[in-house]
Image (spheres, rainbow, N blue to C red):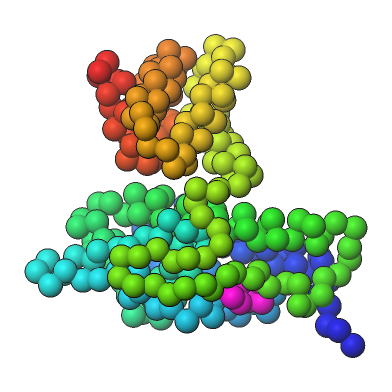
Amino acid sequence: MEEKTDIKNVNHAIKMLKYAIDNVINSDTFFISENIATVYNMIHDDLIISEILKDYLNSGKTLEDFHEHSGITRQLDLQLPTNVDSRIIYLLLLIEKITKDDLNYVSYVNQVYGRTSYEKKFRSDILRSTFRYMVEIIDNHFEAEKENKNEIKKENLSITINHNGGVSKGNIYNFQSTIENITANQSDSLVMEVIDQIKNDEIDLNGKEEEVNQLIKALVVELNSPDEKNKPNKINNIATSLMKFGNQVLLQSVSKVIVDERWILEVGKAIMGL
């Protein structure tokens, strides 16, 4: 008899994982290692979540596959993949090291960026973005499975990734999903996060909400586009246009969510009128 899992239990497990991830993203730095450990334990101890992410957990990779030490400065040369599946594997290996006390989170940030003051940047650029990819992939995986069903076959719980090719220092994994192919849902999620931040900051857009929404969507598309031609000018034009609707306060609000260095650079230029 084939083993099945109640869809309600799947929904609950995913919801609890999202809560735990949210606690990491919004955590005080002092407690972030404990919150990371909660996510790690949930991923490994929850029978449903561990089954869903089984292929990622059994990749056969190590954290050292993603970086190397500089013999002079001891700073890490992080080879962050531009491939979604690879980045998720990196994140899972990282939180495992932190949870097992093999790695101090703040010290690791210092090794990657050269200064601990960049912790929030690391959290946004790496933790939040990669967790977002992971959650979106899980949601997409079960979207069809959940429809008009009360149970899911155990064999259909796991997300299968393509383990083609190996990795050498500085190379990118050859897995199936790439950041260049980010789904529309992921982009929409980021746009909504920016819009929610603007609302939370109580910025008066003077009835121009739709225009601002379209500019934010254009920004997210541009940042994710693999085409680098004229990218700085396009981002600068978006920043300058947003300035017209909310002055630099609006740009600062957007920058609380979008911390990409290319955006931050053009925000500075827009504020200075360059």
- The residue under the point 32% across, 40% down is 261
Q: Nearer the viewer, residue 144 or 19?
A: 144
**Residue 52: within the magenta?**
yes
Q: Predominant secondary structure in magenta?
A: helix
Residue 213 in the figure: left or right of residue 16: left
- The residue under the point 68% across, 57% down is 139
Q: Position of residue 118 (x, y in %)?
A: 28, 51
Residue 95 in the figure: left or right of residue 160: left
**Residue 236: within the magenta?**
no
Task: Check the picture and name the quadrant holding the N terminus.
Answer: bottom right
Q: How many marks?
A: 0
Give the residues in magenta.
50-56
Q: Is residue 243 above or below residue 86?
A: above
- The residue under the point 89% across, 63% down is 149
Q: Quadrant of residue 113?
A: bottom left
Q: Quadrant of residue 30?
A: bottom left
Task: Check the picture and name the quadrant holding the C terminus.
Answer: top left
Q: Position of residue 273 (x, y in %)?
A: 27, 15
Look at the image and tell me whether residue 200 can be seen.
Answer: no
Q: Nearer the viewer, residue 62 or 15?
A: 62
Q: Position of residue 28 (x, y in %)?
A: 40, 55
Look at the image and tell me whether residue 146 can be seen.
Answer: yes
Residue at the extreme front of the image, as rendered: 165
Q: Quadrant of residue 56?
A: bottom right
